[in-house]
Amino acid sequence: MNSTTGGSRAAPEAAMAAQVPHSDRRLVAARRALVARGVHLVPAAVTTSLLGVANETWERFRAHWDELGPDTYAAEQGTCRLRRYGRFAWSAATDRVRLLPRADFVQPENSNPLYIGVSRTLEPLTESFAADPVLRAALRLLGQVATALDDPAEWIAKVHPFRVIASEDANGLPTPEGRHRDGVTLVSSLLIGRHNAAGGESAVFDPDGRRLLTITLDEPGTLLLGDDRRTLHSVSAIRPVDRSHPAYRDVLVVTFAPG
């Protein structure tokens, strides 16, 4: 799937909002692998097929990353990163995705060492992003994955679109906190696009530090899933391939925890 700007026609809302069948063998395989290993990589072709996303629809969705705002907290660590933040509720019983009111982002104990207990005020998702049928389909898909790990009455999904930027003078750090967990049940990272970027290797570890998986997400649509209770994760710095132009890496990070 190409990550350059393309067509703008959107897929029908009804088609994008359709529930991914629990019986789909690819979804069943992903759920089983995640339970067994604590981490699983879903190839881009599988993810986009499960979501029902065509190339032109993906390009429209990708355009939301051009509207992110500065992450001032990451800037304090010397990282140039753009982001927004939103919260949703989802339950397996109804398969309904519901946008929750705006709130600060606070990470719990035993999670991100840089920000434990810090209340971060972040720019909210735009209305068009929050309502985008691709996002809603992704939340339903991830909810069905999360139910393999736990079965609460309701899940809270926290949505973080990120763009990390690197230049000739500064590498981009997707995880300036280093190896960490997010203090949730399911953590996921969906690659949206890369431009002029080398590096950005994702690594997942067990609590004893044993490396479970190392992969560079390089094809838009590739989805990395992790049981955050059993693993830690990090991403290495990105750098420009052509040092005379900036590089960026766009991802959608979504976490699920019991409501």
Image (cartoon, rainbow, N blue to C red):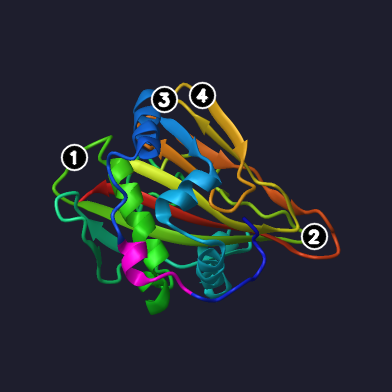
Labels 1 and 3: the sequence-earlier one: 3
Labels 1 and 2: the sequence-earlier one: 1
Amino acid type indicated by mark 2: Asp
Disc 2 packing (10 Å; few <14; some 14–19; many ≥20): few
Amino acid type indicated by mark 1: Asp
The residue labelled by disc 4 is 209
Above-or-below relation of 24 to 90: above
In three-dimensional space, the C-alpha distance between marks 3 and 2, rounded to whole angstroms, equals: 39 Å
What is the tally of numbered marks visible in this picture? 4
The numbered disc on residue 114 is none
Labels 4 and 3: the sequence-earlier one: 3
Residue drawn at (58%, 73%) of the image: 66
Identify the element where label 2 is drawn. loop
Q: Which of the two discs, 3 and 2, sits closer to the camera?
A: 3
Question: What secondary structure is the magenta-colored segment mainly?
Answer: helix
The residue labelled by disc 1 is 151
Q: Which of the two discs, 1 and 2, sits closer to the camera?
A: 1
Amino acid type indicated by mark 3: Arg
The numbered disc on residue 169 is 2
Residue drawn at (51%, 61%) of the image: 54
> Start and end of the magenta stretch?
10-17
Using the rendered image of the protein, determine whether residue 105 is visible from the camera's viewpoint. no
Above-or-below relation of 7 to 143: below
Labels 3 and 2: the sequence-earlier one: 3
Nearest the eye: 21 or 143: 21
Nearest the eye: 101 or 63: 63
